[in-house]
């Protein structure tokens, strides 16, 4: 393994200093406290399989306490009557705090999740942009006036929902926490965040930084813990007004069932199996470089990853060869080494799950073009895996693998690309590569997904909505659309 640069080493040292400060606790009503049960759980570094620290393990008793705190904070004038401009200033201050701690937060994320430091730095920088973007929205959550005959005045108010439960996954935790917090806070809600048990440290550090701003206590609460206990208690709780969930489609369905207790509002950001379509007239080299980046980035643990690469028949073999060549340059290893492109997967379970698809692909007759070597030594590492001549009906092309595994699938023409691209239960993202501008726009219209790209893949902007068609979710995050997901409208008639 290549050694880390001095800057990376300094960042890691700073992160470890914070991690070693002692066991991490729950944030409820502005206080850091142990779990009511006294239980804690282990935080593991997936690159070394070693224990990083222990974290208090919330369960339903802590959820009850957090709901009371979040409700009190929601109704307190310090938050409810804070002017939108003051809220803007708080969100801007949070952005500044994150910006001042980019390297530390990124290194904590790398240690906890295993992602390369450069990738984590990108995620923390995106978190800064997200808070600044939503800071501007505080004063722009507008109601309307409704035309009338002049004897009445009819108008609407957009009001916050109340206490929002937010359950996030382990794949890019800092980004997930940032979008959930910023979105809810700009609309005047209070939040209870349940980070994933497999990577919760940056959520805790972010909440500490938020505590250093003027945000009233209890507006942000953080409950690390497991899904079946803390997560389910939050989803079922009658005192929670909304659940925003990001994670697997299976758990998303469970959240919906649990939310029926009080018919809380639900938004879901779930799995994906994105088609990335390359036509023969595309800029092939750019398309290939980006295709590798999207299936290998964060070791493929990305819901919008381009895991089904549809390639027009005439260039299928050429593209498969080039993809394998480029993928071979994506070095697997120490997340803190400058030349590392892929860190480990999050856990042994996830590694084994991904590994099982190697067998599944070969059993169904897909051709293995790259990868497949077992990793020796500690850490849950998996090298990029490329299958070609895949048929879209195969298991590897239908199921979300959440690892660096690509299926290259040939297609005939525009119609065939759309038909196969849409032949999936998911619909989160998609892309098309072509120099033909009419074809590009026709194909993105025909593909059923919530976020699409033409001649790029995976680029993001806080102003650009994100969310799923079909079983990839309910509702949208990012951009203006998510303001609606965190507010409700009230219409008022005045007889004049
Ligand atoms: P998961 O969906 O179980 O975990 C996501 C979050 O949900 C975590 O915070 C977890 O604690 C929580 N959770 C789990 N069960 C819950 C319940 N009954 N009620 C409330 N909250 C609950 O995902 P997991 O098991 O970590 O990963 C398994 C697979 O899910 C992955 O291989 C991947 O395919 C998919 N996944 C997809 C994600 C996406 O963003 N599309 C993110 C994470 C996982
Ligand atoms: Mg971890």
Image (cartoon, rainbow, N blue to C red):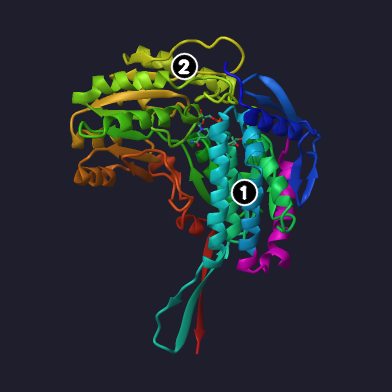
Residue matched to label 2: 356
Could you say where residue 43 lies in the image, as x and y percent from the top left?
A: 69, 28
Residue 449 seen: no
User: Is there a contact, CB below 8 Å, between mark 1 and mark 2?
Assistant: no
Q: CA distance from mark 1 to mark 2?
A: 34 Å
Q: Say which label, 1 or 2, has the lower sequence index.
A: 1
Main secondary structure found in the magenta portion: helix
Could you say where residue 343 lies in the image, as x and y percent from the top left?
A: 54, 24
Q: In this picture, is 285 found above or below 176?
A: above
Q: Magenta residues, as a range?
A: 57-86
409 horizontally vs 253: left or right: left
Circle 1 packing at 10 Å, graded few (<14), some (14-19), many (20+), is many
Residue drawn at (26%, 34%) of the image: 283
Give the total number of marks visible in the rendering.
Answer: 2
Residue 414: quadrant of the picture: top left
Residue matched to label 1: 165
Could you say where residue 81 lies in the image, as x and y percent from the top left?
A: 68, 69
Residue nearest the observer in this picture, 195 or 243: 195
Figure quadrant of the N terminus: top right
Circle 2 packing at 10 Å, graded few (<14), some (14-19), many (20+), is few
309 horizontally vs 416: left or right: right
- Which secondary structure, mark 2? helix
- Which secondary structure, mark 1? strand
Residue drawn at (50%, 69%) of the image: 142
Residue 67 magenta: yes
């Amino acid at each position: 393994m290549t050694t880390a640069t001095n800057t990376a080493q300094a960042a890691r040292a700073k992160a470890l200093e914070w991690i070693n400060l002692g066991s991490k606790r729950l944030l409820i009503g502005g206080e850091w406290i142990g779990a009511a049960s006294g239980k804690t759980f282990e935080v593991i570094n997936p690159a070394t399989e070693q224990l990083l620290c222990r974290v208090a393990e919330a369960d339903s008793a802590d959820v009850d306490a957090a709901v009371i705190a979040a409700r009190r904070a929601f109704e307190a004038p310090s938050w409810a009557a804070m002017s939108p401009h003051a809220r803007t200033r708080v969100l801007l201050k949070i952005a500044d705090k994150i910006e001042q701690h980019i390297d530390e937060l990124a290194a904590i994320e790398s240690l906890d999740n295993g992602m390369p430091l450069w990738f984590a730095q990108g995620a923390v920088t995106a978190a800064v942009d997200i808070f600044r973007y939503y800071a501007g929205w505080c004063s722009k959550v507008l109601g309307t006036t409704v035309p009338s005959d002049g004897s009445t005045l009819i108008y609407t108010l957009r009001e916050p929902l109340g206490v929002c439960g937010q359950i996030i996954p382990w794949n890019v935790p800092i980004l997930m926490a940032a979008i959930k917090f910023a979105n809810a806070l700009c609309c005047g809600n209070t939040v209870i965040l349940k980070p994933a048990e497999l990577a919760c440290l940056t959520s805790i550090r972010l909440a500490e930084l938020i505590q250093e701003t003027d945000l009233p206590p209890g507006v942000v609460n953080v409950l690390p813990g497991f899904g079946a206990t803390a997560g389910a208690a939050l989803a079922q709780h009658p005192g929670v007004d909304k659940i925003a969930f990001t994670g697997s489609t299976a758990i998303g369905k469970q959240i919906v069932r649990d939310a029926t207790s009080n018919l809380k509002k639900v938004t879901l950001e779930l799995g994906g199996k994105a088609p990335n379509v390359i036509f023969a007239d595309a800029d092939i080299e750019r398309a290939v470089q980006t295709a590798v980046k999207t299936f290998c980035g964060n070791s493929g643990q990305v819901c919008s990853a381009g895991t089904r690469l549809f390639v027009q028949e005439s260039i299928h073999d050429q593209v498969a060869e080039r993809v394998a060549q480029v993928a071979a340059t994506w070095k697997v290893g120490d997340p803190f080494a400058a030349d590392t492109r892929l860190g480990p997967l999050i856990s042994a379970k996830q590694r084994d799950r991904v590994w099982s698809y190697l067998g599944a692909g070969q059993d169904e007759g897909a051709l293995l073009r790259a990868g497949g070597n077992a990793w020796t030594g500690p850490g849950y590492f998996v090298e990029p895996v490329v299958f070609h001549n895949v048929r879209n009906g195969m298991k590897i092309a239908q199921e979300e693998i959440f690892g660096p595994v690509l299926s290259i699938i040939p297609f005939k023409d525009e119609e065939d690309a759309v038909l196969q691209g849409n032949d999936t239960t998911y619909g989160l993202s998609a892309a098309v590569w072509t120099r033909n501008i009419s074809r590009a726009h026709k194909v993105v219209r025909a593909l059923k997904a919530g976020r699409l790209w033409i001649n790029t893949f995976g680029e993001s902007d806080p102003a650009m909505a994100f969310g799923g068609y079909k079983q990839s979710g309910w509702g949208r995050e990012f951009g203006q659309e998510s303001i609606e997901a965190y507010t409700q409208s009230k219409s008022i008639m005045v007889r004049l």
